[in-house]
């Protein structure tokens, strides 16, 4: 039996046991499951391919070396605490087509400075960006994300 570094079942990525550096999620994955990369070290960049619709709960939580995440526009939901405590994450461009950002999705990302939130987002749950004091949300004027930033007293730039 051939050993694989990917644990994928029914399109859901359950775990990864491969080398660090830059990691591209395989084509055919539709969901990154709960805790798939939880507390992982040595990976600085993750590329999420077209077709991944959901990032599960705690999928990348406590991912100490993660500096960059590249999404495609197929991602619709970022789950509970999916990227919480990614201490080196500095900027994120959330994908056009994203609809929901769950509770604590980016909480504790203390170095996070810039977050592009597309107009397609219609739900941002409580504490999604808690502990991201440096973060400036880049939002479409009149969007749900602008309203959220105003209500939460977050820094934002509307375009």
Image (cartoon, rainbow, N blue to C red):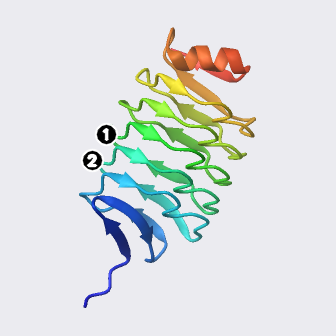
Residue in the image at 68% along x and 54% along y: 87
Provide residue 34's location: percent of width, then percent of height: 49, 57
Provide residue 110's location: percent of width, then percent of height: 73, 45
Q: Can residue 148 be seen in this view?
A: yes
Q: How many labels does the image show?
A: 2
Q: Can residue 48 be seen in this view?
A: no
Q: Nearer the viewer, residue 111 or 124?
A: 124
- Mark 1 secondary-structure assignment: loop
N-terminal of the pair, mark 1 or mark 2, is 2
Q: Is residue 119 left or right of residue 80?
A: left
- Mark 2 secondary-structure assignment: loop
Quadrant of the image containing the N terminus: bottom left
Mark 1 vs 2: CB contact within 8 A: yes
Instruction: Give the residue furthest to the top.
Output: 142
- Residue 25, compared with residue 93, is above or below; it is below
Provide residue 114's location: percent of width, then percent of height: 60, 35
Q: Which of 82 and 134 is in front in this view?
A: 82
| Distance in Å between CA atoms under marks 1 and 2 | 6 Å
Residue in the image at 28% along x and 58% along y: 11
Q: Is residue 27 left or right of residue 119?
A: left
Instruction: Give the residue furthest to the bottom.
Output: 1
For mark 2, does the 10 Å Cα neighbourhood hold few (<14), some (14 to 19), or many (20 or more) residues?
Answer: some
The mark found on residue 111 in the picture is: none
Residue 19 sits in quarter? bottom left
Query: Badge 2 is on which residue?
Result: 51
- Residue 44, compared with residue 49, is above or below; it is below
Provide residue 143's location: percent of width, then percent of height: 49, 14
Residue in the image at 64% along x and 20% along y: 149
Residue in the image at 56% along x and 34% along y: 115
Query: Badge 1 is on which residue?
Result: 74
């Amino acid at each position: 039996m051939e050993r694989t570094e990917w644990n994928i079942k029914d399109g859901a990525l359950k775990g990864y046991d491969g080398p660090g550096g830059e990691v591209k999620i395989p084509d055919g994955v539709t969901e990154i499951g709960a805790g798939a990369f939880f507390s992982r070290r040595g990976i600085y960049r993750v590329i999420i391919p077209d077709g991944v619709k959901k990032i599960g709960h705690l999928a990348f939580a406590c991912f100490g070396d993660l500096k960059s995440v590249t999404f495609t526009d197929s991602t619709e939901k970022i789950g509970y605490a999916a990227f919480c405590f990614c201490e080196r994450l500095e900027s994120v461009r959330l994908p056009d087509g994203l609809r929901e950002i769950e509770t604590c999705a980016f909480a504790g990302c203390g170095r996070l400075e810039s977050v592009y939130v597309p107009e397609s987002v219609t739900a941002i749950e409580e504490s999604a960006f808690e502990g991201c004091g440096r973060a400036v949300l880049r939002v479409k004027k009149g969007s749900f994300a602008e309203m959220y930033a105003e209500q939460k007293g977050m820094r934002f730039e509307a375009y």
